[in-house]
């Protein structure tokens, strides 16, 4: 880990600058939504999720961003367009057996993909109650402010396993990765956040983090010196004790 700053007991450590967005709307005292609230909010979304079965590959593209699902959806779109063109727009372009074969291919693709998608439909992402998630975030935030990077990262990754759509946790993880010098990982985390619905409310903070990553790459950003223990100067120590060793000899 580049520029890793280990927590050192007994040494004074200044906390890193607190991002302006951090902790503004997150509080353990905020009322948690009940399980019935989540069930009521999820009913319309569940129906919309199952509507994606109407188009081959769409469940995996829409719900998981799968590239294989995108390829399948595009293949079905091309075959469907060819069938429409050869049947209704230019029916004399190809022979009737070819048109029948095209529509047979469209039907096979649709049937096979729909059956397979229904059998392995992507499950809904976890949406735990705030009372289950917020304590993890508070501990991760406190570890971040204390410069305990390892504990903060572990807490954030545990939180994201419970709630993968927690935009604030994703943004704090990207900020942490930038501060410890893992710029490529920080940029990937910001790309993932900005491409999801959870990143809509954090666009300004994401843009700021991207600029700081760019500045870090160019060497323009002023960074604080890491807190480290002084190491002995081996050469000086040897020269200092050389007369004593000569006398002893």
Image: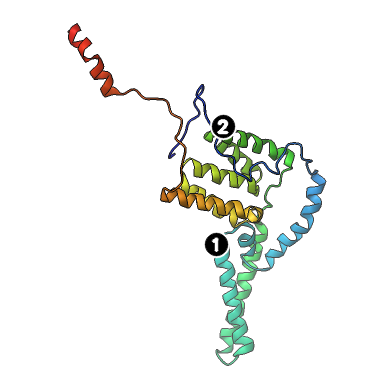
Question: Compared with residue 39, is residue 104 higher up or lower down, i.e. above or below?
Answer: below
Gap between marks 2 and 1, in whole Å?
42 Å
Indicate the position of residue 221 as horizontal and vertical percent values: 46, 46
Of 72 and 211, nearer the camera is 211
Mark 2 and mark 1 lie on one chain; the one further toward the N terminus is: 1
| The N terminus lies in quadrant | top left
- Decide if residue 37 is on the left or right side of residue 139: right
Q: Residues within 10 Å of mark 2 (few under 14, many from 20)?
A: some
The mark found on residue 68 in the picture is 1
What residue occupies the far bottom of the structure in this picture? 92
Mark 2 in CB contact with mark 1 (< 8 angstroms): no
Question: Compared with residue 63, is residue 169 higher up or lower down, i.e. above or below?
Answer: above
Indicate the position of residue 229 as horizontal and vertical percent values: 42, 25
What residue occupies the far top of the structure in this picture? 248
Q: Which residue: 22% across, 10% down? A: 244
Q: Which residue: 59% across, 47% down? A: 171
The mark found on residue 146 in the picture is 2
Residue 164 seen anywhere in this rendered image of the structure? no
Q: Which residue: 29% across, 23% down? A: 234
Residue 125 seen anywhere in this rendered image of the structure? yes
Indicate the position of residue 163 as horizontal and vertical percent values: 66, 45
- Decide if residue 177 is on the left or right side of residue 51: left
Q: Which residue: 59% across, 88% down? A: 96
Of the two numbered discs 2 and 1 in the rendering, the one whose residue sits closer to the viewer: 2
Indicate the position of residue 82 as horizontal and vertical percent values: 58, 81
Disc 1 is placed on an element classified as helix
């Amino acid at each position: 880990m580049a520029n890793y700053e280990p927590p050192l007991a007994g040494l004074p450590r200044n906390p890193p600058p607190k991002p302006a967005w951090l902790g503004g709307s997150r509080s353990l005292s905020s009322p948690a939504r009940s399980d019935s609230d989540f069930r009521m909010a999820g009913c319309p979304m569940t129906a919309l999720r199952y509507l994606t079965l109407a188009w081959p590959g769409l469940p995996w593209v829409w719900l998981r961003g799968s590239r294989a699902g995108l390829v399948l959806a595009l293949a079905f779109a091309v075959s469907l367009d060819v069938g429409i063109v050869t049947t209704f727009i230019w029916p004399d372009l190809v022979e009737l057996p070819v048109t029948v074969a095209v529509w047979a291919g469209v039907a096979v693709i649709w049937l096979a993909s729909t059956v397979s998608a229904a059998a392995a439909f992507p499950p809904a992402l976890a949406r735990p109650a705030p009372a289950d998630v917020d304590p993890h975030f508070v501990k991760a935030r406190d570890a971040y402010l204390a410069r305990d990077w390892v504990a903060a990262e572990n807490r954030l990754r545990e939180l994201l396993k419970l709630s993968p759509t927690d935009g604030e946790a994703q943004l704090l993880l990207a900020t942490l990765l930038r501060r410890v010098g893992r710029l490529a990982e920080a940029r990937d985390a910001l790309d993932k956040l900005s491409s999801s619905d959870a990143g809509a409310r954090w666009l300004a903070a994401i843009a700021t983090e991207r600029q700081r990553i760019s500045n870090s790459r160019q060497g323009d950003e002023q960074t604080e010196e890491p807190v480290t223990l002084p190491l002995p100067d081996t050469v000086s120590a040897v020269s200092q004790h050389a007369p004593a060793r000569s006398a002893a000899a």
